[in-house]
Image (cartoon, rainbow, N blue to C red):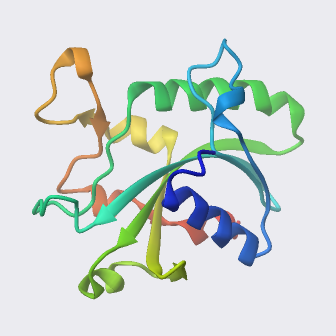
Amino acid sequence: MKRLYHQEVAFEYFLRNRGSSYLAVDEAKRPVAVDKNFDFLVLTKSKVYAIDVKGKQIPCKGGSSFLWETWIHPKDLTGLRQWEDMLKPLFRCDVESLIVDVYWIREAAFLEDFKSVFEHRGNKYGMKAITISEFEKHKEIRSGFSIEREEWQLPRKRAKYLLRGIDFFLTA
């Protein structure tokens, strides 16, 4: 976890306040053989989630007409997949990786797009999540980027409907 990003700090605040069992991970201590660390390991009654938090804003910075930014780097998926494979033998339940978009809600008009909103340090946040398996099924190359600088995103017209509220996963 990089404490430089207010969305990651807000996510930890959210976990702590709901009484979740979790471990925050220090990105600087990543094993060399893994493409990328997850940010949090969260234990529920039925699953363990390796979570990569992505800080986003709604509406997007720069006034984009597209609200649901979901882009990630390819190493985000490969790193999470590597961690799933390493963690599965350690737990006696399913291990699944999630990409959690923590949206900093900058305008009140967007509050209704989230089932639950929380406040931390004067900012309002809403969260949406997707498993890496679902992301992989629907991903597309982010428009406007060359193959050398490839980034993936969910299809813009369907992103809002593919993402789920974080409680869908954490209450299971």
Q: Quadrant of residue 43?
A: bottom right
Write the residue at 63% across / 19% down.
34
Task: Where is residue 24? Give x, y as percent.
Answer: 73, 49
Front residue of 53/169: it is 53
Q: Residue at x 76, y 44 (%)?
A: 94
The answer to whether 81 appears left or right of 57 in the picture is right
Specify the quadrant that holds the N terminus. top right
**57 versus 139 height, above or below:** below
5 to the left or right of 90: left
Q: Residue 150, image x and y in percent?
A: 26, 24
Residue 133: x and y in percent read 50, 38
Of 46 and 114, nearer the camera is: 114
Front residue (pair 127, 158): 127
Please state if 48 lies on the left or on the right of 12 as rendered: right
Tell me which residue sits at (52%, 24%) in the image. 78
- Write the residue at 63% across / 32% down: 37
Above/below status of 129 relative to 152: below
